[in-house]
Amino acid sequence: MKSYAAKYTYPLVILAIVVSVILQVAWLSQLFIEQRSHIVQDIDNMFTNTAKKNLYLSCQSDSSQYEYFHEYFLSPEWVQIRQGFDDTRGSNISKGFEANQNEDSSVIVFRLTFRKKASPSHGVAHFINSGAMQDIYRTDSISLVSMNKLVAEGMRSMGFKGGYSHRLYPYGGALSNDASDNKDYAYVSKRVSYNLEHLYKYQLLVTSLNKVAWYRMRYYLASSVLMVVLTGVAFYYILKLMRSRQLYADARVAFTSNMTHEIKTPIATVALALESIIKYNLTEDPEKLKNYLDIGRLELRRLDAMVEKVLSLSNNQLQFTLQKTFFDVQVVLKEMIRAMELQFRNVHAECEFIGFPEPCFVDGDIVHITDVFYNLIENAIKYADKPLRMVIRCEADEEWTVITFKDNGPGIPAIYHDQIFERFFRVPVKGDIHSVKGSGLGLSYVKQIIDMHEGTINVQSEPGKGCIFIIKLPSIE
């Protein structure tokens, strides 16, 4: 059931993230379309109001005297009249327009002339009563500058810093636009009059609306990206936690099965020692009898340490109480090597001890230190891919006692040098398969005991060149 759930966990998480991203993209796409529509409406409103304002300013020669006249050009009524007049077209219709301001009144005249015969001209005739045509063109130029300025201000207020232009059309020109002329523009306005001279009509062109649309959506974009990132991070940590818990659970299961094999080793050694005593009647050889009894004693002591480690797992941590005393490390090493003679003999291994001329005293727990040494030797025996050759060396100075364990085993890749001291970690032999029985607690226990003695342990190893474990314990003079 666990493997079935694990099989579909990653695909479901990936699917959830992908669906979340797709939904965010769809929402942002719809929002982007709406923003573009709003921008078009805003430009339309700005452009219409700007044209009316510029028309108002173009005829504002004396605002105090002609205030009502000027304000009329800002009213909806004027827009309707102007639009109706502009849209009146026909081959036999000509239009005339006149605007005059006198001392006591202002006059605007719209004139429609219906001819009996069609006329090619569709322009607007200007009835000039108060100024020459040259003045009309000058006024138109001034109005155009004002119109451009007002349009620029309006576009800036909406976030446009460029990317827009305008076209001027003769007032009587055709209303239809050539689509090919406008295909490069995202927005093309209607044509409007920008003064009372009616020489030209003004059209606003905008190259792109996307930049302003994305800018208006910046907070929505940020929130969407943040949501997707937070979702991804949350799933990542959930998966990491699930994987860690699964690995830990698998390690505990493996530990339970492998610990049986670990415990059987000292039991088998004690049984072998007792059988040898009986079989060879060693009661008549006190020296050998003592040697085999020492082997049994050390194995039972090691078995007791194993039981203590297993019981400590109930608290999910390895905690030990040290019973420190002064002892000579070399004496412990010699006794341990002698106690393991049977094991060395069974696997055709050789163990050489190179001692130091003087005693190497340390202040520590003799039981746990002995178990540390045993763990290192047992690992070398278990992982040996050929007859084991081990050299144990002990040296000391005023500060440190250094114990070195060197073997000719398969070695440990550099990437695992730090991980081997982690709890439940075991070096994979082939891929992720452990062909050698073990609990995965040995080196973790070794590291903890050495740390509790304020010492250090390091490993030097390369694949195919064996291992060198170096233990340093504070020396006692």
Image (spheres, rainbow, N blue to C red):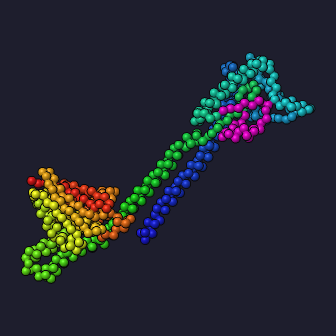
Quarter of the image where one finds residue 158: top right
Q: Residue at x 79, y 35 (%)?
A: 174
Q: Is residue 85 above or below residue 397?
A: above
Nearest to the observer: residue 260 or residue 3: 260
Q: Residue at x 18, y 70 (%)?
A: 340
Q: Position of residue 233 (x, y in %)?
A: 43, 53
Residue 318 seen in the current view: no
Q: Residue at x 60, y 42 (%)?
A: 210
Quarter of the image containing the N terminus? bottom left
Q: Position of residue 124 (x, y in %)?
A: 81, 28
Q: Is residue 227 above or below residue 294?
A: above
Q: Name the side, left or right, on which 443 lies relative to 119.
A: left
Q: Position of residue 319 (x, y in %)?
A: 22, 61
Q: Position of residue 213 (x, y in %)?
A: 58, 42
Magenta stretch in the rendered image: 165-191
Nearest to the observer: residue 33 or residue 363: 363
Mark count: 0
Q: Is residue 238 above or below residue 156?
A: below
Q: Name the side, left or right, on which 89 lies relative to 226.
A: right
Residue 123 seen in the current view: yes
Q: Residue at x 68, y 32 (%)?
A: 166
Quarter of the image where one finds residue 365: bottom left
Task: Spot the residue most to the right.
Answer: 116
Quarter of the image where one finds residue 197: top right
Residue 174 is inside the magenta segment: yes
Residue 276 is inside the magenta segment: no
